[in-house]
Amino acid sequence: MLKNRRLPQILMIVAGLLLILLFTKPIWRISLIAPQYPDGVHMYIYVNKLGGKEPGTLQNINILNHYIGMKYIVPDDIPELKYFPYVVGFFIILALLVSFTNNKYAFLIWISLLLISLILAMYDFYLWEYDYGHSLDPNAIMKFEGESFQPPLFGTKQVITFTAKSYPHFGGYMIMLSAFFGTIATYLKFKIKHEQVIS
Amino acid sequence: MKAQKKLFGNGIAIAALSLLFLISACTPTNNGNSGMLNNDAASAVYVAPGEYDEFYGFFSGGFSGQVSVYGLPSGRLLKVIPVFSQDAEKSWGYNEETKPMLNTSFGFIPWDDAHHPELSQTDGETDGRWLFINGNNTPRVARIGLSTFETEEIIEIPNSGGNHSSPFTTENTEYVVAGTRFSVPYPQKDVAISSYEENFKGMLTFIKVDDEGHMNIAFQVLLPAFDYDLAHSGKGKSHGWTFFTTYNTEQSHTLMEVNASQNDKDFIAAINWKKAEEYIAAGKAKNIPGKHYVNRYDEATHTATSTLVNTVPVLTPEDCPGLVYFLPTPKSPHGVDVDPTGEYIIGSGKLSADLTAHSFTNMLSAIENKEFETTIQGVPVLKYDKVIGGVVKKPGLGPLHTEFDDKGNAYTTFFISSNVVKWKVGTWEVLDIVPTYYSVGHLMIPGGDSKKPQGKYMVALNKITKDRYLPTGPEMNHSAQLYDISGDKMKLLLDFPTVGEPHYAQGISADRIVSKSKKFYPIEENQHPFKALGEGQTKVERSGKTVHVYMTSIRSHFAPDNIEGIQVGDDVYIHLTNLEQDFDVPHGLAVQGARNAELLVMPGQTETMLWQPQREGVFPFYCTDFCSALHQEMQGYLRVSPSGSNTPLKWSLGEEEEEL
């Protein structure tokens, strides 16, 4: 039983450490696929930067977007890329502290904060997509009546001639795994205490 | 009754047959090869849309001075690479960056006769790094990089005339060679042509290739004034030797078709280049005048530089015993080809009906036993019957070139009888003969002159086309034929026209090149002195009569696109940087009245057009490569004012009257 009692703490440490991978791996991937782009144009969203499968990806996306008057995607204009690393760092350190204190309510706070942050982050992501998809230059080269250029939040969507795909990438799956371990840890923490009380 | 029926049946069959005969007699036959062109052949060369060919074929353009790249087996033209000839399409030799590539000691020479492409090798196997090719007329050797498919280096060969026996690499690309087909006075001077025997010499050149592919002349070998026609380097056991065929051992200088065809035997010159290295290390080489240019294109600056070298080291057989031997070979031998094991050196006596195979082992023992017939200008002539390894008897007329497969067979072209003969190395037995259309010169099997041939296809490279394709006036592109050689019998699969003259070709498995092929130039690596790495760096600068325009292109505009303050009589250098960072998005630039060619700039690259405005006015410029849906709008204006005018120099994009 001693082994089991340590398990929530270990899981919480793992949940925290998994988030370190966000500093090297992209969280999300938006792909544009069309016949003349046989390899697709793949934009990677990291916790602190925007990147691509090729060095010129962002430029290539901006070149495509300029035909419809979409704003240039300039990483320096996105403040989230500056403070998100601190948020991630906060969750990593907090996970270690939670594990150290071994307090079940601390576990609950950590996982609750993480899930709330994730919901907020997705909402923020949606707002950015909405902004890029709707704040079009009135002098746009090509205008499409009633067409929405907003990429999907999650999933696949046809945007004019392009198939736009928006899915989590490696880092995104790591967040999910972290949340999963955090939830299990919290659940076990409560359950173990409960059993101990009974016994 | 039965017999009657049978007879009746036979009667019908005979009638049908004779009808068939009549029809076929009335139908124009196509050289009797129609039986070959069945569905089987069609599917063998069919590469479905979007699929890739199995092999790259690099075909020399002969007198077009270029190299054309084909996919095999489909015969689809993939690219034409400009080498020795100016190419307006790619601005090769027209833009400021590539003009130095065509520089020679005779000045700028915008053409040459490109004969023998030769792939670089590692351990006797094609490695997909580079392709070398010789320029025959003003002796040169070029190196093409196979990540960019662009000519990266051209070296001039001094003391030579007619660089035909070239480039023919050694098995680790230690050297490429350059032997003179036309002997010339040495040193070059004003003498009576009739003093040929006294004043003329034949020079063989060994060009060292370093790990970056840079070429430098390592040494030359001064030989009698014969015509050094073709070459191949040894491999395996004969690695360390290079063999050159000769004709005109008569040393004639006029009516050569008769006078150079008198001797029953000419020679194959065997050069021991490892011995040459020893002699050079021992200080036996003399530095002689040999003014030549080495022109190198730098991928970082996207610019070529041309460097003059004044002397070359030369070795003479008299000072260097064991460096050169002559192997008597009938009769005016053309091609010299070494089998994959390196044992047999096949001399194709083009005025003979037989093929001569010298044995390398026999040659070494003849040298050891001093089996010399005579000595010519310090070069021992080995006894023919001591070096001969075998003879292929009368397979055709006019043998020229031999390549090999991976099953111990050889394939030799016969120009006069217009066919390819397959024979067995070692038994010298003829296995198969197929016609070619017409008058085949070289042939090519991927890796067919290396240690590891890939004997699936063979391409016949023909000199005469005649009726093979729809007529196109008096001049026809030369034809090539693709044969399946995987079975016992050669089988014609495909017939296709080529660019210029497909003098010789090399083939290589596509997978040795595909993964290395560059998609674009990373812009951060651009070190061009007049680059503009963003629209913020664009500008126009004047210094006296010279104007430098730092211009960029990206879909779908130039920056700047309005330029004023240029004057009649200026030298305007327009340096265009293509800011794109995507595969296959070049931008072009054409300026009205520019007396050269367009620019065609690859992503991340900078190229320069020299424009010398002659008239006042406002002249449009535009992008020539259909780059996007707004390609037509990719245009701009250059205002030209009179010489000495006060129009201020200014440039803009988008906003009126605003500098960038």
Image (cartoon, rainbow, N blue to C red):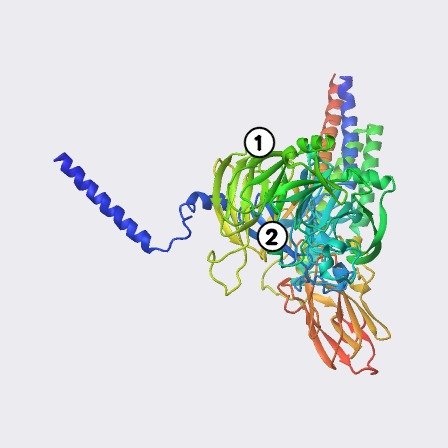
Comparing B250 with B558, the one in front is: B250
Q: Which mark is residue B236?
A: none
Q: Quadrant of residue B302?
A: bottom right
Give the letter of the chain under mark 1: B
Task: Name the mark nearer the viewer: 2 or 1.
Answer: 1
Comparing B381 with B402, the one in front is: B381
Q: Which mark is residue B426?
A: 1
Q: Residue furthest left?
A: B1
Q: Which residue is mark 2?
A: B503
Q: Where's residue B274, x and y in %?
A: 78, 37
What residue do we see at 62% from left, 65% from top?
A142
Comparing B599 with B522, the one in front is: B599
Q: In the shown orientation, is residue B318 left or right of residue A57?
A: right
Looking at the rendering, in which quadrant would you find the C terminus of chain B?
A: bottom right
Residue B579, compared with residue A20, is above or below; it is below
Mark 1 Cα shell of 10 Å, populated few (<14), some (14-19), many (≥20): some
First of labels 2, 1 by sequence position? 1
Q: Where's residue B625, x and y in %?
A: 64, 63
What residue do we see at 78% from left, 26% from top?
A10
In space, the residues marked 2 and 1 are separated at their CA atoms by 28 Å
Q: Where's residue A35, x and y in %?
A: 58, 53
| Amino acid type at mark 1 | Gly
Comparing B419 with B360, the one in front is: B360
